[in-house]
Image (spheres, grey):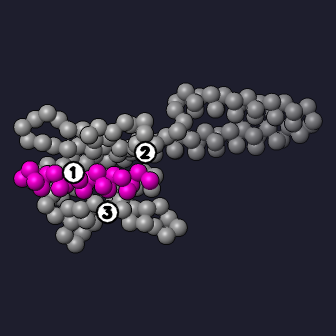
Amino acid sequence: MVHNPEKTYWHHEKPDSKQEIITITLWPYRSLGSRGYLYFMMGFIGLIFILSLLFYSLGAWPVIGFLGIETSLVWLVFRMNYNAGRNFEQISITPEATAVEKIGWRGDKHHFNIPSPWIKASCIKGEGRSDKLILKYHSEQLEIGSFLPSKEKSSLADALNESFERMRGAA
């Protein structure tokens, strides 16, 4: 089962090999691509430039410095958002174990190895907060896909549980 990345925020691959390995990759959704960002910033800077000329012609030239600071803050916030968009998680499921690798935007990696017979995915509804997608095994739990929207977490939990059941049957 391969999901269309344009409709979901996760992707499932099954390689054609003797031992089946199910790999699911999770990544954050970004609605504004690099071209859209360029157009947005060009429009925003153009608007700030026109406002700067207006304030200068009115004799309120000190406002121009604040408009420059505002432009810098908008650029900084978008840069931080795009950096967070480079986070991703990869889940590899085999009959023996499930490997979860979380990779941050700076390249820092966190690796978790969980025995597959004891694992179950569940979506915990948050009160006033975003839902949590949890992998439960023994008495421990691991949150995955914290950057995914709530509507995707429940369908991903179902797909993960289906994959875990399939692997238990293959063992």
- Quadrant for residue 35, please give it: top right
As helix, strand or loop, the secondary structure at mark 3 comes to strand
Q: Residue furthest right?
A: 58
Task: Please indicate, yes or no, whether residue 105 appears anywhere in the rendered image.
Answer: no
Q: Which of the labelled discs sits on residue 82, or is there none?
A: none
- Examine the residues drawn in magenta and state their main secondary structure: helix
Q: Residue at x 75, y 40 (%)?
A: 67
- Magenta stretch in the rendered image: 151-171
Q: Amino acid at mark 3?
A: Ser
Residue 163 is tagged as 1
Discs 2, 3 touching: Cβ within 8 Å: no
User: Residue drawn at (26%, 53%), measured in percent from left and top?
Assistant: 160
The amino acid on which the numbered mark 2 sits, given as a three-letter code, is Pro
First of labels 2, 3 by sequence position: 2
Q: Which mark is residue 28?
A: 2
**Do we see residue 169 in this rendering?**
yes
SS type, badge 1: helix
